[in-house]
Amino acid sequence: MPAVSVIIPVFNVEPYIAQCARSLFGQTLEDMEFLFIDDCSQDRSIELIQQILETEFPARKAQVQCFRMPVNSGQAVVRMFGIAHATGDYVIQCDGDDFVDPGACSLLYETALSGQYDIVSCNLRCGSGEAWTVKVQHPTPGQEKEDILLGRISYSLCTKLIRRSLLDKLRAPVCNVGEDMVISVQAFLKGKRFCHLPEALYSYRTNPASTSREAGDEALLRRLEASRQNVHLLLTLLQQEYGYSPSSPEVVYTKYNGRHWLEPVVHLPRFYRLWKATYPEINRRFLFTPKIAWQTKFWFLLIVLRLYRPVKQFTQTCRRACPRRHRS
């Protein structure tokens, strides 16, 4: 049984998969398993993985499995497929267009063992080319379950080493938007011991061709509907299996989170009305719900006052003028 299983969904990432594969095969942790899951790619992604493995990392060959989905299934199904086939003590995910630091898995795994932690998370970098920005999270020790449910820490599975037993008998996400949310929240609710590392060990590439960045109003509406389906699933779990009340901050925030795909276009009357009609029961209570971050309430209020877009544009301009850069 390997120490760590890495699940790598692969779909048409030929320009990036070589860097991803090298960063994984070059990990300082030796006892690993790599599950590459080809979601019916139409490029040379899998061929490049096999070529790099054969010529540069032959010692890793026995640790690598490549699967191909029978039909294009999307991230939600692929992630669950990987979880079902993983055999490691711990599991982490890595998207095929991203990459990780050489000592990432070793540091995460050694930390997990040192404190018998169920989940060890880390910070990440976001960007592309020469410009990378570190996204820092500050979970509160002892309040990690509240933190994940209130959006204080990222849902991303790629920054979390999770004990595999926490991933048994999960309710599978139903759509490809918010699938990380459904899986991460369930793992945190089942876990008992958590640790967060301040190091930015994972590099998330802002790939304009990725499905999560698909442009257009219709694409945005599809993402909203998919998000709402996963939010509905999570709300059912929170209220029926874990006993959260409909007025709890965790339930209110989860409903609010189901609206966020509309924020880029919420200045348009059509989408503003849709924003208000998505879980409308929170419209009057959101600002008065305790525990929700003031920053989140601030943006909520700006949307209500129809000031969201100009303030957002101003803050983005300021960030571009004073970026924090990381050279990859």
Image: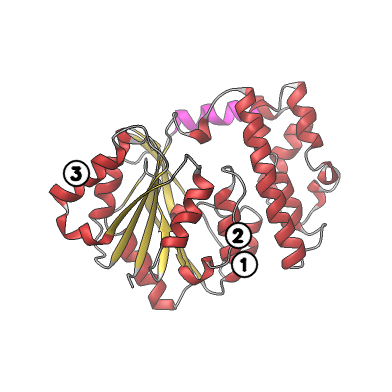
Residue occupying the point 82% across, 57% down: 247
Secondary structure under tag 1 reads: helix
Q: Do the residues labelled 3 and 1 touch (CB within 8 Å)?
A: no
Quote the CA–CA distance across marks 1 and 2: 6 Å
Rendering quarter of residue 125: top left
> Whole-percent x and y of residue 298?
71, 41
| Image quadrant occupied by the C terminus | top left
Q: Which of 277 and 72 is in front in this view?
A: 72
| Residue 316 among those drawn in magenta | yes
Q: What stretch is highlighted in magenta?
A: 310-322
Above or below for 325 versus 103:
above
* Amino acid marked by disc 1: Leu
Q: What residue type is labelled 3?
A: Gln
Q: Does the rendering let one see residue 122? A: no
Residue designated by label 2: 185
Q: Earlier in the sequence, mark 3 or mark 1?
A: 3
Q: Which of 74 and 248 is in front in this view?
A: 74
Q: Mark 3 points at which residue?
A: 51
Instruction: Find out whether the residues at labels 1 and 2 contact each other: C-beta distance under 8 Å.
Output: yes
**Residue at left 60%, top 58%?**
148
* Front: mark 3 or 1: 3
Q: Nearer the viewer, residue 290 or 321?
A: 290
Q: In which quarter of the image is residue 276?
A: top right
**Around disc 2, counting alpha carbons within 10 Å, would you say few (fewer than 14), some (14 to 19), or many (20 or more)?**
some
Could you say which disc has been placed on residue 156 in the image? none
Residue occupied by mark 1: 189
Q: Could you tell me how far apart the alpha carbons at marks 3 and 1 are, in whole angstroms?
A: 40 Å
Q: In this view, does 167 lie to the left or right of 203?
A: right
Callout 3: few (<14), some (14-19), or many (20+) C-alpha neighbours within 10 Å?
Answer: few
